[in-house]
Amino acid sequence: MDFRKVIRIFFIAFIILDLFLITSFFKEAGQFSQATTTTEGNSLNSLVKSMRNDQIQMKNLSHKTGTGYYIAAANDDYLRENVNQLEYSNWSYNDNTRRLQVSFATAIKLKFKEQPQKTLDTLVKDKTFVIAGKNYHYDAKLSSAKKIVYTQMVYGMPVHSQNGQLIFTIKNGYVQGYSQGYLSKVQILRQKKTTISELRAFAWLYQYNKVTSNTKLVWDELGYIKLLSVNGNTIYQPGWEFYLKNTTSGSYTSRTINAFTGAVIE
């Protein structure tokens, strides 16, 4: 047999073998990934079934993960330093909480009690009424007939702390004034990380016995929660907050879980 022909046959066979091994590897890797995902999905489905059996009422929670950062905000007196821009109001400042308390010289009537943001959105964005108001967003779930809450947004996520909330006081349909906390000089400490899904977070709370039977999930949200204070800054990170109602007693409670690690925040 021609030597060159033999070499060519071996060369072709070698390529075919490589292609076979590469194809097998990716096929097995894909099957492993699919098996892992399937196992996780089966585990969550089992937990959802258990929660339903325990009379836990909830919406269809999302399997999708998200992203967020570790961030730092300066423990400074930004609000007091900029308070001179406010007009038509009286104010006081709490040095301990760094919250600004403002009362309007003339109370403002809410035109639509069921949709207070239609009156307040314009006011909030007016720098003569609210400092850095453009960074806040109306929060319907935290609001009530006696208070209207606007939450500071940081990198597309709400701040789950009064440190980043604007709370209007309502009396007889009139806005009397507000108290304000604000995160200033916010900076990213670490690169973007993946957060656990809404369903995974709630399932872990259930596994940790933080969600009891006969419970209704009223609302939940992913937002920045306070982690610790260090070197003149406060560190925040994403956390899932769940607001729950006991359908037997009628009592309410809030549960928070670390959206990076899955640990319960007490």
Image (cartoon, rainbow, N blue to C red):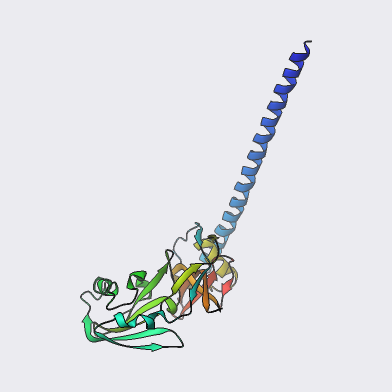
Q: Residue at x 52, y 77 (%)?
A: 233
Q: Residue at x 48, y 76 (%)?
A: 74
Depth check: 81 or 244 in front?
Answer: 81
Q: Is residue 260 above or below residue 28?
A: below
Q: Residue at x 69, y 34 (%)?
A: 21
Q: Quadrant of the N terminus?
A: top right
Q: Is residue 214 left or right of residue 11?
A: left
Where in the figure is residue 118, as x and y percent of width and height? 24, 71
Depth check: 41 or 127 in front?
Answer: 127
Residue 56 in view: no
Q: Is residue 156 above or below residue 107?
A: above
Where in the figure is residue 49, as x and y percent of width and height? 54, 61
Depth check: 133 or 219 in front?
Answer: 133
Q: Is residue 197 above or below residue 37?
A: below
Residue 29 in view: yes
Disc count in the image?
0
Where in the figure is residue 164, as x and y percent of width and height? 42, 76
Q: Quadrant of the C terminus?
A: bottom right
Q: For residue 182, which quarter of the picture?
A: bottom left
Where in the figure is residue 240, as x and y percent of width and height? 50, 68
Q: For residue 247, which quarter of the picture?
A: bottom left
**Residue lying furthest top:** 1
Q: For residue 219, which quarter of the picture?
A: bottom left
